[in-house]
Image (spheres, helix red, strand yellow):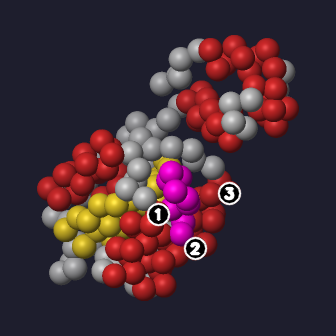
């Protein structure tokens, strides 16, 4: 990735809120963002994220969309209400156009699919607002995106193969074969 793009400086307020319920990922990202000069505060739930966003609204935020206790967009709304100028990136393992549009309408600056690394996140947080961040160096393959979507619908249907197949307009046997395979790269 070319780092010579026009990136804004972190600025005097380097406060960054990270909200994710994946503890190992949260800790790795916290360390990586501190190395890049951010003053990081981490939260593992919607409730904790909203509490920090309300009490100490940060200049930057990285929020996971799906958390165990709710939707990360609630944190985005709470932060946007307290600090309209905050730059917010929404992360999710399940990229979908509808949720990307909802995130941006609520006030997210950008939307990234996991796995996103600290470089991608930093570029999205610091990109000039009229400029698009560069495409990821290792984007998910089309097969991986399809597999992720099928897994998401499968989970939303409480792991019911017949219901998932019906919603995806797919034969049940075909779905079973896909679910039995390892995830594509």
Residue under pointer 2? 106
Q: Residue drawn 68% across and 30% down?
A: 159
Q: CA distance from mark 3 to mark 2?
A: 12 Å
Residue at coordinates 61% horizontally, 29% vertically from top-left? 147
Q: Camera-side residue: 89 or 161?
A: 161
Closer to us: 171 or 9? 171
Kindly report which numbered mark, 2 or 1, lies closer to the viewer in this rendering.
1
- Decide if residue 174 is on the left or right side of residue 103: right
Residue plotted at (33% across, 46% down): 23
Residue 178 place in picture, x, y as percent: 67, 18
How far separated are the C-alphas under marks 2 and 1? 16 Å
- The image quarter containing residue 175 is top right
List the residue tagged with mark 3.
98
What number is the disc on residue 46?
A: 1
N-terminal label among 3 and 2: 3
Write down the region rendered in magenta: 65-74
> At which x and y percent is residue 112?
47, 53
Q: Is residue 169 magenta?
A: no
Q: Nearer the viewer, residue 45 or 104?
A: 45
Q: Is residue 71 magenta?
A: yes
Q: Position of residue 36 (x, y in %)?
A: 17, 59
Q: Is residue 139 above or below residue 128?
A: above
Q: Earlier in the sequence, mark 2 or mark 1?
A: 1
């Amino acid at each position: 990735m070319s780092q010579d793009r026009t990136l804004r400086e972190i600025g005097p307020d380097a406060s960054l809120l990270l909200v994710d319920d994946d503890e190992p990922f949260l800790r790795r990202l916290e360390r990586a963002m501190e190395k890049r000069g951010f003053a990081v505060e981490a939260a593992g739930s919607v409730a904790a994220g909203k509490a920090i966003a309300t009490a100490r609204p940060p200049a930057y935020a990285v929020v996971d969309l799906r958390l165990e206790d709710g939707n990360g967009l609630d944190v985005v709304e709470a932060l946007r209400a307290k600090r309209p100028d905050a730059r917010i990136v929404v992360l999710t393992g399940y990229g979908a156009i509808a949720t990307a549009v909802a995130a941006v309408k609520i006030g997210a600056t950008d939307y990234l699919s996991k796995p996103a690394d600290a470089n991608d996140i930093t570029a999205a947080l610091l990109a000039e607002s009229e400029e698009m961040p560069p495409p990821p160096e290792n984007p998910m393959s089309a097969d991986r995106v399809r597999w992720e979507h099928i897994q998401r619908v499968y989970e939303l249907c409480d792991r019911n193969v017949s219901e998932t197949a019906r919603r995806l307009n797919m034969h049940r046997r075909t779905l079973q074969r896909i679910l039995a395979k390892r995830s594509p790269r």
